[in-house]
Image (cartoon, helix red, strand yellow):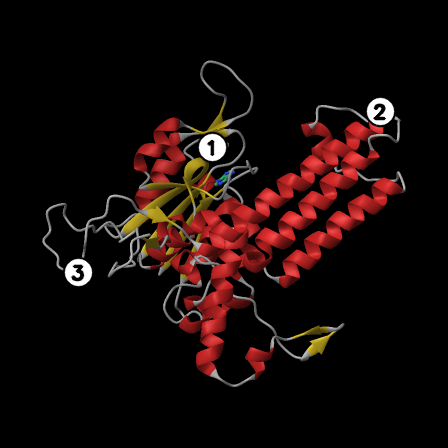
Amino acid sequence: MKIDILTLFPEMFDGFINTSIIKSARNRKLVDINMINIRNFSLDKHSKVDDTPYGGGSGMVLMCQPIFDAVKSIKKDNSKVILMTPQGIKYNQKIAYNLSKEEHLIFICGHYEGFDERIRTICDMELSIGDYVLTGGELPSMVVADSVIRLVDGVIDSDSHSNDSFNNNRLDYPTYTKPREYAGMKVPDVLLSGDHKKIDEWRKEESRKRTIERRPDLLKKYSVVRSTLKGNIELFNIDCNGINPKNNAKRTDMISVKNLKIVDSYLNENVIKNNIEKKIEKLLMLIMKVLDTESTDDDILVLDEAERLKSLIINKYKKILGEDYVKYILKKIDYIVLQFKSSKIYIPEEIIEKSGKSR
Ligand code: ADE
């Protein structure tokens, strides 16, 4: 793969291309990276590359000519020209994977206040690395180049990225190394068991749990469909990579149902946990109210509410949420009550804001 980076600050890339995996990929000729100084293409006698915006406004705008000429000098039929801009499509692992199959990438790094709108016309793709504005496209182009290069065949062991976070819309499972116990924290037994089937199952499950806890949005496309009806009902992926059976397809392995519930047991667990957190917020708001009255008559309201919440968790949710979580959440409620009793309660800022009070 060849990567050309058009920039006004080639020196920013020194560390990037001369360190670690990127350096080794270059040495092994798996990737060829060149920084091209946009200024070298300026036709101005002072090597000017930017000018003030038409219509007024602050800052300088990168001009068309040096960029058009620079791109023209290197672009081939197999090149993909990528403009780095916060207005581009949001970069992700899938795009990284697709770009890693390209032969030639040309990155254009804008700087200062922006670039002439007409530069967009010579680009195949505009990429943003997130909803924040950097001083230029140099860091974003390094982010994209780094994530693409590691996926190029041979750069790293392909096993290392087959389990990457975001592959198959899942976050990576937790990993451990020596020692077996550190600061009282033990490596899970299954990883020391030598039973690879069990280890694989554990990893799949942890990756799934982790995704649901931290990034449930990634799983939306992969919900399992279950029916409440008994019988032979397929479990299938909602996102079939764009291929769906046609409406009138005659398939004996599919049945029509009037009512489908989309349920994911872990999602369910997450919803319950959220509800419990909301109930704790309510308890804190009640505490604020009671503390405001400066009378101790209403203290019983808080204690009642805390007890009610605890028995709800024990009686209704213990089975779903598991011993450890229930123990943790009950302790949390007890702690809040203890603080309340000693009148030294700490109410988090966001709860104070939600209740519309100032303290
Ligand atoms: N240039 C400045 N900010 C950027 C961003 N967030 N993504 C891509 N290019 C940028």
- How far across and how far down the image is residue 237, in percent? 30, 55
- The picture quadrant where one finds residue 83 is top left
In the displayed structure, would residue 51 be above or below residue 9?
Answer: above
Give the amino acid type for the residue marked by disc 3 in the picture.
Asp
Tell me the residue at 44%/63% (across/down).
150
Q: Secondary structure at mark 1?
A: loop
Give the amino acid type for the residue marked by disc 1 in the picture.
Val
Tell me the residue at 11%/51% (across/down).
249
Give the amino acid type for the residue marked by disc 2 in the picture.
Thr
Is disc 2 in contact with disc 3, using a CB cutoff of under 8 Å? Answer: no
Q: Which label sits in the foreground, 3 or 1?
A: 3
Outermost residue to the bottom: 194
In the displayed structure, would residue 73 be above or below residue 290?
Answer: below
Which label number is shown at residue 334?
A: none
Q: Secondary structure at mark 2?
A: helix
Which part of the image, by quadrant, shows the N terminus?
bottom left
Please report whichever mark, 2 or 1, sits nearer to the chain's N-terminal start.
1
Give the left or right position of residue 22, taking residue 328 as reference: left
What residue sits right under mark 1 in the picture? 49
- How far across and how far down the image is residue 231, in percent? 25, 60
Q: CA distance from mark 2 to mark 3?
A: 65 Å
Closer to us: 127 or 218:
218
What residue sits right under mark 3 in the picture? 253
Q: CA distance from mark 2 to mark 1?
A: 67 Å
Q: Secondary structure at mark 3?
A: loop
Give the left or right position of residue 16, taking residue 327 as reference: left
Which part of the image, by quadrant, shows the C terminus?
top right
What residue sits right under mark 2 in the picture? 293
Tell me the residue at 35%/55% (across/down).
224
